[in-house]
């Protein structure tokens, strides 16, 4: 090799980074590189920086000044400062979630419960009041009955399938109506448009600052099957852990609503700290939400077949699935649960009662235990919306936070079984259910 071909043993003075020791250069690299380009990735990259480089003190100050402003009000890209304040991966997911729900804006949180707490937290203050349905997901029930009272937030739980009860429960200090539909776990439906009419009647006589907001947990339906904002809700909460995430790998939540709530929600998230990690946002962004429609179409086809099988089984007392003509609120389901093309979309969740005249819970326990030990396509696990079919007993599991007397009074019985239908061949799901029921 000639001298001309030999690599230089001294740093190139034209590259100032090469004048630093290799120990420092291994940490900092080039610092600025044209390789960082989010606009041309087919699959969005994951943000893996807890804090962000600022080009100047003025840019840092500007970033803090603009924090809390809706991005649409800016004439430039957001200035990222710190992951808890905002970062690109979660931001891209938020844009897509807002579109999925047909909402103005969305914010992601570390879990579905963090999202629910934020939605209620920005709408209801101390000495104000919340009306909620009498049956709720167990942790939501605990939040409303155990924790909100510590902040002097009062509540009434009523049967929201009766709109007269909703109207009677509203007080001068009521600021929010909270509900799930379909309800977890009993699959009852609440008429969102009907609740909207009740709220409008109340709000017509109030100052806008004292209006009653409607918050809907849409986790069971997903935006594919139902978009509450189109039906009259003000705010939607979603657990991204469930069908939107779809694969059971990450926990997350989201609040979707009007831009008028954006600043309060992002400040709440900043201060309470329930921010969604970009590592958990990314799977929902690139796998979960993009496959939601395809998965839900297949979930629903299988769910109907499974529900029809259960409905005719001699050991099953009742089946609650919105797609069955025998479903008590079929007309409401047919009107309210629609996919993006306007087709009936009853979802993937089933609740059924095993025959148990004495309400001991033993038949349901035997079924669940058989499934846990022997079933191939039935996984005994909480959560829902995954590609695997999940089975659980709400009375003793997901809704154990509710006192037994309260559960029974509200129709949650020991013989209830919740099914979240997955992507397995429905013949196999039915095969395992048939054998599980034989063990009852």
Image (tube, grey):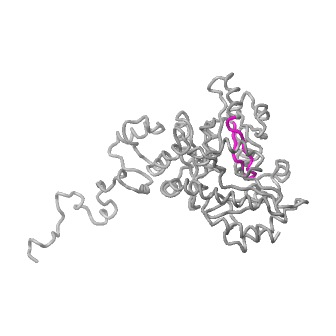
Residue 81: x percent and y percent?
A: 42, 46
Chain part drawn in magenta: 177-193
User: Quarter of the image holding residue 424?
Assistant: bottom right
Residue 14: x percent and y percent?
A: 17, 57
Q: Nearer the viewer, residue 54 or 396?
A: 396
User: Quarter of the image holding residue 174?
Assistant: top right
| Residue 202 within the segment the image draws in magenta | no
Decide if residue 11 is on the left or right side of residue 123.
left
Hey, which residue is sitting farthest bottom in the picture?
1
Quarter containing the N terminus: bottom left
Looking at the image, can residue 280 be seen? Answer: no
| Residue positioned 61% across, 36% down in the render | 234
Q: Main secondary structure of the magenta part?
A: loop
Question: Total marks drawn?
Answer: 0
Q: Nearer the viewer, residue 221 or 48?
A: 221
Residue 1 versus residue 319 in the image, above or below: below
| Residue positioned 65% across, 27% down in the render | 210
Quarter containing the C terminus: bottom right
User: Quarter of the image holding residue 165?
Assistant: top right
Residue 145: x percent and y percent?
A: 75, 45
Decide if residue 301 is on the left or right side of residue 97.
right
Decide if residue 150 is on the left or right side of residue 299.
right
Residue 348: x percent and y percent?
A: 66, 55
Looking at the image, can residue 51 be seen? Answer: yes
| Residue 188 within the segment the image draws in magenta | yes
């Amino acid at each position: 090799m000639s001298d001309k071909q030999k690599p230089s043993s001294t740093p190139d003075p034209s590259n100032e980074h090469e004048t630093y020791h290799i120990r420092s250069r291994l940490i900092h690299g080039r610092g600025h590189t044209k390789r960082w380009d989010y606009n041309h990735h087919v699959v969005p990259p994951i943000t893996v920086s807890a804090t962000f480089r600022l080009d100047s003190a003025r840019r840092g100050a500007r970033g803090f000044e603009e924090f809390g402003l809706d991005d649409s009000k800016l004439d430039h890209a957001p200035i990222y400062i710190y992951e808890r304040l905002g970062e690109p991966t979660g931001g891209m997911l938020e844009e897509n979630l807002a579109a999925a729900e047909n909402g103005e804006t969305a914010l992601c949180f570390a879990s579905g419960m963090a999202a629910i707490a934020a939605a209620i937290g920005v709408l209801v203050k101390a000495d104000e009041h919340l009306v909620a349905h009498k049956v709720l997901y167990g942790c939501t029930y605990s939040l409303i009955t155990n924790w909100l009272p510590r902040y002097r937030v009062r509540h009434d739980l009523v049967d929201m399938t009766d709109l007269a009860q909703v109207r009677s429960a509203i007080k001068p200090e009521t600021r929010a109506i909270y509900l799930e539909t379909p309800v977890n776990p009993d699959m009852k439906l609440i008429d969102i448009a009907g609740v909207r009419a009740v709220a409008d009647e109340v709000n017509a006589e109030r100052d806008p600052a004292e209006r009653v907001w409607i918050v809907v947990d849409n986790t069971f339906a997903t935006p594919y099957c139902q978009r509450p904002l189109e039906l009259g809700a003000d705010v939607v909460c979603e657990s991204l852990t469930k069908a939107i995430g779809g694969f059971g790998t990450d926990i997350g939540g989201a609040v979707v609503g009007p831009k008028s709530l954006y600043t309060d929600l992002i400040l709440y998230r900043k201060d309470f700290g329930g921010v969604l990690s970009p590592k958990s946002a990314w799977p929902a962004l690139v796998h979960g939400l993009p496959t939601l429609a395809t998965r839900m179409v297949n979930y629903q086809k299988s769910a109907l077949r499974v529900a029809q099988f259960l409905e005719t089984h001699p050991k099953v007392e009742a089946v609650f699935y919105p797609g069955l003509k025998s479903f008590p609120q079929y007309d409401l389901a047919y009107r309210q649960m629609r996919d993006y093309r306007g087709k009936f979309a009853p979802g993937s969740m089933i609740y059924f009662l095993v025959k148990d005249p004495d309400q001991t819970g033993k038949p349901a326990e035997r079924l669940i235990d058989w499934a846990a030990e022997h079933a191939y396509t039935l996984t005994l696990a909480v959560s829902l919306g995954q590609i695997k079919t999940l089975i659980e007993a709400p009375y003793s599991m997901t809704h154990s936070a509710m006192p037994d007397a309260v559960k029974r009074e509200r129709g949650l019985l020991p013989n209830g079984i919740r099914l979240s239908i997955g992507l397995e061949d429905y013949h196999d799901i039915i095969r395992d259910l048939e054998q599980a029921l034989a063990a009852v």
